[in-house]
Image (cartoon, rainbow, N blue to C red):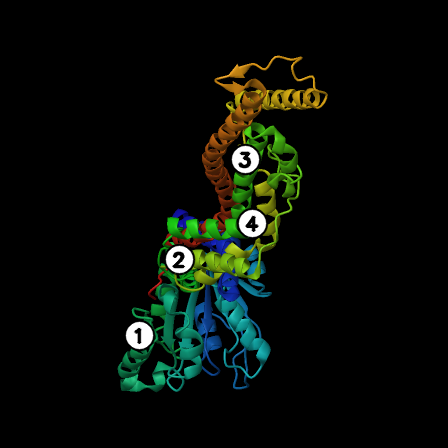
Amino acid sequence: MSGALERRLEALDEAAAIAGDRLDADAVTEAEDVVRRAGERLGHGLEATVVALAGPTGAGKSTLFNALAGRALVTEGVRRPTTSAATAAVWGSAGGGLLDWLDVPMRHSLDGDGPDGLVLLDLPDFDSVETSHRLEVDRLVRLVDLLIWVVDPQKYADAALHDRYLRRLAAHAGAMLVVLNQADRLGADVTRAAADLRRLIAADGLQGVPVVAASARTGEGVDALRAALAERVAGRKAALERLAADVTVAATRLSHAAGTGRAAGVGRGDLAGLTAALGSAAGVPAVEAAVQAAHRRRGALATGLPWLSWLRRLRPDPLKRLRLGDTPREDVKTSLPRPTAVQRGQVDAAVRLLAGDAARGLGDPWPALARRAVTAREAEVAERLDRAIAGAELKVTRPRWWTPVHWLQLALAALAATGVVWLVVLAALGYLQLDDVLPMPELGGVPAPTALLGGGLLVGALLALAARVANRFGARRRSRRARRALDARVAGVAEELVITPLRAELGAARALQDALARAGARPGS
């Protein structure tokens, strides 16, 4: 049984660590306190069983304590409160370190009339007019192994007992006894009063708690109570049962704070929507358009008419204008425009939609925790997206066919230039009336200079037009390839800054529920 309790304590400790600042602080603190107290109590061994007599003023706790001890260890009297501090009666050698832990300085070591290993405490009145007495009772009620509530015929239905203690300790029925003291004053009504007390206790959720009718003054029922204590002490299980109940209560309270259900998880549609929104804010469409425009420009320079190249070179390269090169460089800050208010709103909406859909199925507080997780690194998003764009492999490679077309255009331009020079020379010779000096060959009935000029220009223009059409197709293909690379980089940022924290939060919810189940939580209680 100790091994089972230790496993439950480990699970509760794990649950408290996961809950951390996620759940209600009081519930987390209670779980941590239970783990700590259980470790300390188990560290003192199970050889001793700590039993506390607790009850209201005038119930006769001290008289019953003396009766069980077989001698007058504490003062009995009519002055209230009689007991101002806890007093211990110890049978056997056990209990020294344990009483130090309980912080009970008043101790009496006894031999004989009592089970070996019993540590019996007489507590102050829980309804004492002295605040320190009530606080001492509350402290020790949380620590002892077995509670014996001592009540009298006049106060056994007192709300202070039932509301403040019994109902709150409903899970600790196995670590509790109730003594209806002063039974000698009831006469024949003792059976009816005991039955009524059992009814009230059952209404508090403490079904099955033994009720012993006794009279500390006459000794009636004291032997039965002593036998019940001897049985509990001999079993060496009272401490384990008390600690097990404490774990159940703490785990159940933490379970109520943690909620129930399973998360729907991150859907593909929401992830795609987030990637699209982040890509738009990061300037992916602008980079895609720049890749297309840069390919067309470079293609025109390589395969277009050389005569017009100098005009095209006056316009900057679209990619370089954005400070994007042909090779990825994450260390370079791009010149992309900052996201607009509309784009930022779209990102915020996509992030919150993703968190809400992923946490669907979980109760409070997980939807809010999911939103906190996806926005925790919001300040890093803009810079990381810019680095992702700068570090993307855009693959704006130069097609191989550009080179032969380029040389062909140069050759055609050279032919056209030859024709121009030839015509200029002929014009000069005609002006000097020396036009008969040079022969005038013909190509297909067309003078050679004219054929060279017209043919070079016409063929070059047709070739440039064909290359332009091909470059448009190539530009679109490269822009799509660049878009895939950019989307992958943006998705990587989304995965790191949004998805991973979100999945970790949802994983924490599941791990917490699993740990609480292993700790023995009763969510429906």
Mark 4 lies on residue = 282
Q: Nearer the viewer, mark 4 or mark 3?
A: 3
For the question of whether residue 494 can be seen, the reply is yes
Residue 295 bears which disc, if any?
3
Q: Secondary structure at mark 3?
A: helix
Dividing the picture into quadrants, the one containing residue 263 is bottom left
Disc 4 and disc 1 in contact, CB within 8 angstroms:
no
Q: Amino acid at mark 2?
A: Asp
Q: Earlier in the sequence, mark 4 or mark 3?
A: 4
Measured as percent of width and height from the top left, residue 17 is found at: 51, 53
Callout 4: few (<14), some (14-19), or many (20+) C-alpha neighbours within 10 Å? many
The CA distance from mark 2 to mark 3 is 41 Å
Q: Earlier in the sequence, mark 4 or mark 2?
A: 4
Mark 1 lies on residue = 202
Q: Nearer the viewer, mark 1 or mark 2?
A: 2
Q: Amino acid at mark 1?
A: Ala
The CA distance from mark 1 to mark 2 is 44 Å
Mark 2 lies on residue = 357
Q: Secondary structure at mark 1?
A: helix
- Name the side, left or right, on which 345 lies relative to 194: right
Dividing the picture into quadrants, the one containing residue 242 is bottom left
Extreme residue toward the right, this view: 432
Q: Nearer the viewer, mark 4 or mark 1?
A: 4
